Image: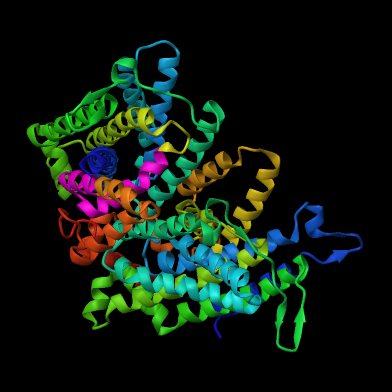
Amino acid sequence: MLSNVAPSVFNGLILGAFYAFVAIGLSLIMNLTGTINLAHGSFLTLAGYLAFTLVSKGTSFWFALILAPLLTVVVGVVIERLLIVPLYKRDPIFSLLLTFGLSLIAEEVYRLIWGPNGVPFSAPGILGGGISLGFMQFPTLRLFIAVVLAAAMVLLALFLWRTRFGLRLRAAIQDTEMISAMGTNIQVLYMVNFALGMALAGLAGVLASGLLGLSPTMGNALLMPAFVVAIIGGMGSLFGSIVGGLLVGLAISVTTLFIPAANEVIMYILMAVVLLIRPRGLFGTEGLFG
Amino acid sequence: MNRRQKQGYITAIAAVVLLAILPLKLGSHSVLSLLHLDVSILSEMLLFAIAAMSVNLLLGYTGLMSFGNAAYFGLGAYGAGLSIHYLNMNFIEGAIIGTAVALVGGLLVGPFLLRRRGIYFALLTLAFGQVFYFIAYRANEFTGGEDGMSFPRPYFGFPGWHMDLQEGTFYYLMLLVFAAVLVGFWLIVRSPFGRTLQAIRQNELRVRYLGLDSNKFIFVALLVSAAMAGLAGALYGLLIMFAAPLMLDWQQSGDFVMIMILGGAGSIWGPVVGSLIYVIGKDIISTLTQTWQIYIGALFVICVIAFPSGLLGTLLNSIARRDVGAPISEEAAPHKARESGAPAGNAAVAAEQKES
């Protein structure tokens, strides 16, 4: 029994960490600017393909793991400055639609450049094997992914809670106007915040493409669970996103084991239950976003 | 009858007459055949217009960002398809069952959606819409799964009389349905109920202070919207004789929202104009190039940036200085200001006083 359940629990937690990662990126952007970034999944896919291209051009996986997210940040920030910034003052539906349009364009562009089907992209040999945990074999790649995701989350938390810039960012979520009046350049905040979201998406994209398979729709497949995770964890709460993500990942993997047909619907059931008991989400702040 | 009402009637009659004569042949050609368009494109246009109107009721009139109306649309298509395939229902029964299934979907999801507003509401509609997608996708012995299900189009008629629906007659039936929905929609938004919805858009807090339970109004609006989208979906299923999970997908919802924004939110004709541009534009582009998705996406981006109150809205605003795209124009408050209620509400009230 243990040898059966334990691997799927671990796999579920890693899947959940991905969801949490994407959800945190979405939440960062949503909290500060009210933009629901439907193109978030497209940026994730972009990072995966960039890493694929870098590696196939001969660079090492490790170099690509750092460079691809950085390139994604550059592309993301350029798009934000040019297209999304003018919409911050308008109703959120416009940025929602704009990013929706962008995701349509991106999907087709990826298909044109990298082909409609998935491309093979695997991690280097050193991550190929498995590590024995005594009662089970655990793939090194998954362990590596878990460590990178956890480290990135710790870094993000340190940035947000231990630096002046992070302080301003958190304050701006509560009252943008006041922070602006106190002399902080709000556009820089918006930009850095968006860049953070892109960096998280980029990192998740490169790691996910080794695990889930790289195809034009990879990012969008992670996007919807990430929304659900953000709702379950509570909008405005990064900790909530982490808990929500792990919870959803766990629920999916356990359901897959026992009732495979319901493994996608389970997270929506979870979401419905949370909404009934605690509409603001597990760790959400009441009042933020109505 | 004031001048604006008279204009409204004239536009409505002119539009329906124009739509009715489009497929008629003059000699060996019709306007349609000269444009290389099939008459079923016009049916599709009308049905997408109804679906976009269902979004408009929520977004344009009530101020609720619904990004999940494709769920009801798809439920309508599956309702019609399944009842025809398994229960041998006729055309009218199929359409009614489709609408009813969508309505049940709205009844199930509505109480959850009611709990939140603003972008949180948008997220909930997005997420709950996907539930039905996965159900249709997963129940493959029953629904055909990812490949979808095809079903025949039954005779249209009553006991004692029936007729076979060809593409042409189907279109005229759709035109009839469309006209009825248009009149119904017009009556709803003009009724005290519709006025209350618009009041909720402008300032929900104030509506509650006036003693009205805004949740009840929003719930009914959700159900009306679900039924409209369901009707459109059921008839669309009967048009293409097919139902697939993609009809329930969030990208389909995005198309409906975009159609509405394309024409102009908060106006009766906006979704119709938007649908005309979207459906025919998509048809023409997709025959020209395989990568049509890029152009549709670009259309979205350009429209959002350059025509915030929609093409029709921008046109009317510049001609008559009317406030067609009012609910989600430049002046709309950012999401945080809206929460406190006061600033956005006062602006809306001021705008209304100016108008009258």
Judge whether residue A229 is colored magenta: yes
State the extent of the magenta-drawn residues as a range.
Answer: A219-247
Q: Is residue A148 visible?
A: yes
Q: Tell me the quadrant of the picture where the N terminus of chain B can be found.
A: bottom right
> Is A176 or A196 nearer to us in this picture?
A196
Q: Tell me the quadrant of the picture where the C terminus of chain B can be found.
A: bottom left
Which residue occupies the extreme bottom position in the image? B160
> Is B87 or B30 nearer to us in this picture?
B87
Which residue occupies the extreme left position in the image? A162
Q: Is residue A35 visible?
A: no
Which residue occupies the extreme top position in the image? A58
Q: Can you give x and y, in whole percent of width and height, for residue A204 in the image?
A: 31, 32
Q: Is residue B273 above or below residue B350?
A: above
Judge whether residue B236 is colored magenta: no
Q: Quadrant of residue B209?
A: bottom left
Q: Quadrant of residue A123?
A: top left
Q: Main secondary structure of the magenta part?
A: helix
Residue at the image point whose x is 52% and y is 74% from the top: B99
Q: Can you give x and y, in whole percent of width and height, for residue A286 in the image?
A: 16, 59
